[in-house]
Image (cartoon, grey):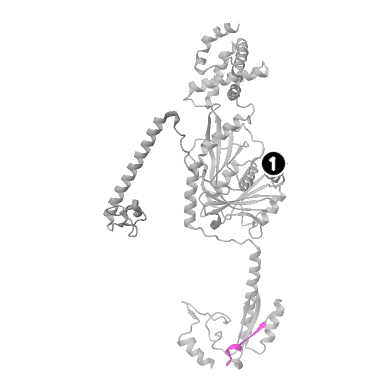
């Protein structure tokens, strides 16, 4: 009888569904209506009992009566509740008519809670779901190591510099940078070296005549140019600049424009670098040559 | 080591391989049970190997010098890049099919200069300080980009709004344990979505340089080493982030360099010291990316059509095989 069951399991001896905590006792039985371990809510200790459980989103009302106590297989009778909330409540009422108030009330409460959490599940699945992907330590370590090696193999600075110089050669920058030496080198390599240099020299000498006065003017601006370049390499940079200016001037002469900007205007010849330093001394002689 | 010096019982004295038999049979270093002695013998053996190797090298060098001009050319050392397994999807520059594909894919409007890139940068939920700062710096590096906070919004809701406001690209920086570790780059009007694993992120103050901040000029873009078809599409994705006409006055360059499937991003300012020399100074953040997946449409992890996913078991089998 239920009283005996309760006096044994509930109070004194061991019940495997019972979980005790400091303040309360819980019942882990899946048919338990409230979840607490009480005389009135223990499914084992009550011969007439009912619960609401949900399976795969549908709610069922489970009922247990004394008549079937001897047949464990048929003990729990299951009724599918309608999806409509009010109709389901009416169903509970009509199935549990004449049942104790407590069980009826608790069943309806439980059903309400279940429907609420089902609604919540549905809402949440529509929102973004975050999936946690675990990091694998070995793989992370391996990838980090490979990344380091790839970085070393990449030699990024060199690659970038090379690419930039390539773009300079291919004239993507247009007229901004005045390093036409490479154009001249290309021309040299195309086996028109001597004739071109001669013609250029002539042109340059012509321009030399014109720009004699401007030379000093330009040198001052050379130093301005070199401000943003390495001050360490003043000599080389100034030489290069002078070369550049030569080239620019040559280009200008190629394009036959006499209006040279002061920055690019100097009268320098495009001869080996060392000579540039002594240019002023040797120029009169070359001019005489041209003449 | 055992086989050379200690002949197996079967071989000893057998007529099958009389040259290999050594009398008396020597022991191998690995058979000594005492660890100290074994270690000592091993070191001795190692030193001997090194000596032999050095002697061989010297001999070879002497021969080389002796031959002078007639010496055979030096052997090229093997590198992983040399030994790379040839990928059949490597793009040939003259391939018409690829050219046609590229003319009609989702980036065609960008490359035909019909659209101007406009980029939205955002993070995952609740970004920490480092990620926020990284986003800001990234926004300075990429022109015409805006950072927005993600307050728990679903990406699928954000995307239609972005499209309505004419954004062309969406970058989502994923964060884990206070550092950014993932990047989702999505080309917006129905474009491909690429998911990367981001590592070694350095903010501007951590980079050892003495440069100033990146200016507002449009930088140039360098894309290195994107050889395969997949690499090509990723490269185009990166290129589509930046406006078409770089302002050379700014002298800034953003580089995406692919090496062994790792994409290194750097942002430099360059200056041409001479015609053969250029100086670069690194400003701007740096990070490395590794592609994890490429998806055809916009971001949709459940129902999207994936063009490429990194499957570790299948793809990481060879050390010399790379996919980008």
In the displayed structure, B131 sits above or below B68; it is below
Query: From the viewer's perspective, is residue A70 above or below residue B162?
Result: below
Query: Residue B234: x and y, percent?
Result: 62, 47
Farthest residue toward the front? Answer: B15
Query: Residue B141 falls in which quadrant of the image?
Result: top right
Q: Residue A41, how many percent across, how many down?
A: 56, 84
The residue nearer to you, when weighing B305 against A105, is B305
Residue visible at 51% across and 90% down in the picture: A5
In terms of secondary structure, where does tag 1 sit? helix
Range shown magenta: A70-79
Q: Is residue A276 visible?
A: yes
Residue B157 is a magenta residue: no
Residue shown at 28%/54% (left/top)?
B25
Q: Residues within 10 Å of mark 1 (few under 14, many from 20)?
A: some
Is residue A78 highlighted in magenta? yes
- In the depicted view, which residue is nearer to us: B286 or B138? B286
Q: Is residue B59 above or below residue A190?
A: below
Is residue B54 shown above or below A35?
above
- Residue closer to the observer: A9 or A151: A151
Subunit bearing disc 1:
B
Kindly tell me whether residue B206 is visible in this rendering: no
Q: Give the residue at x 65% y 74%.
A: A57
* Residue at the image position 63 percent from the left and 68 percent from the top: A121
B152 displayed left or right of A240:
right
Q: Residue B142 in the image: x percent, y percent?
A: 61, 42
Residue named by callout 1 = B111
């Amino acid at each position: 009888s239920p009283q005996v069951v309760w006096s044994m399991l509930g109070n004194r001896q061991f019940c495997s569904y019972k979980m005790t905590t400091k303040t309360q006792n819980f019942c882990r039985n899946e048919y338990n209506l409230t979840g607490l371990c009480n005389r009135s809510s223990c499914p084992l200790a009550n011969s007439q009992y009912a619960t609401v459980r949900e399976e795969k989103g549908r709610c069922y009302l489970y009922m247990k009566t004394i008549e079937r106590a001897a047949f464990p297989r048929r003990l729990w009778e299951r009724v599918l509740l309608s999806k409509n909330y009010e109709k389901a409540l009416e169903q509970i009422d009509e199935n549990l008519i004449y049942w104790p108030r407590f069980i009826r009330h608790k069943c309806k409460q439980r059903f309400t809670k279940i429907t609420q959490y089902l609604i919540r599940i549905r809402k949440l699945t529509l929102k973004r779901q975050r999936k946690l992907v675990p990091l694998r330590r070995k793989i992370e370590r391996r990838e980090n190591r490979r990344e380091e090696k790839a970085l070393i193999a990449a030699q990024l600075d060199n690659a970038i510099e090379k690419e930039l110089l390539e773009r300079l050669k291919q004239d993507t920058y247009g007229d901004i940078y005045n390093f036409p030496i490479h154009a001249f080198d290309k021309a040299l390599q195309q086996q028109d070296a001597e004739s071109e240099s001669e013609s250029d020299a002539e042109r340059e000498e012509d321009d030399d005549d014109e720009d004699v006065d401007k030379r000093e003017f330009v040198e001052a601006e050379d130093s301005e140019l070199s401000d943003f370049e390495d001050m360490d390499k003043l000599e080389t940079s100034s030489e290069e600049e002078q070369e550049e200016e030569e080239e620019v001037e040559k280009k200008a002469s190629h394009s036959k424009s006499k209006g040279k900007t002061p920055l690019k205007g100097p009268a320098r010849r495009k001869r080996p670098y060392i000579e540039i330093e002594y240019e002023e001394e040797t120029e009169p002689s070359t001019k005489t040559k041209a003449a | 080591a055992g086989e050379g010096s200690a002949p197996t019982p079967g071989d000893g004295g057998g007529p099958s391989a009389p040259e290999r038999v050594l009398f008396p049979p020597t022991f191998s270093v690995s058979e000594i049970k005492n660890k100290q002695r074994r270690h000592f013998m091993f070191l001795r053996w190692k030193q001997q190997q090194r000596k032999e190797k050095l002697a061989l090298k010297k001999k070879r060098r002497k021969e080389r010098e002796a031959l002078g001009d007639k010496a055979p050319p030096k052997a090229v050392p093997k590198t992983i890049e040399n030994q790379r397994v040839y990928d059949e999807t490597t793009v040939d520059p003259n391939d018409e099919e690829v050219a046609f594909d590229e003319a009609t894919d989702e980036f065609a409007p960008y490359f035909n200069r019909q659209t101007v890139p406009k980029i939205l940068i955002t993070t995952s939920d609740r970004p920490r300080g480092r990620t926020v700062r990284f986003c800001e710096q990234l926004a300075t590096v990429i022109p015409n980009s805006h950072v927005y906070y993600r307050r728990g919004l679903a990406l699928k809701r954000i995307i239609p709004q972005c499209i309505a406001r004419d954004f062309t690209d969406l970058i989502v920086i994923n964060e884990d344990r206070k550092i950014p570790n993932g990047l989702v780059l999505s080309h917006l009007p129905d474009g491909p979505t690429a998911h990367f694993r981001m590592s070694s992120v350095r903010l501007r103050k951590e980079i050892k340089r003495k440069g100033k901040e990146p200016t507002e000029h449009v930088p140039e873009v360098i894309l290195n080493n994107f050889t395969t078809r997949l690499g090509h599409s990723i490269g185009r994705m990166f290129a589509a982030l930046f406006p078409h006409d770089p302002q050379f006055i700014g002298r800034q360059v953003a580089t995406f360099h692919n090496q062994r499937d790792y994409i290194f991003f750097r942002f430099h300012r360059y200056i041409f010291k001479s015609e053969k020399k250029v100086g670069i100074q690194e400003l701007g953040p740096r990070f490395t990316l590794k592609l994890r997946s490429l998806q055809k449409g916009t971001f949709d992890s459940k129902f999207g059509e994936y063009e490429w996913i990194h499957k570790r078991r299948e793809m990481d089998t060879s050390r010399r095989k790379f996919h980008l």
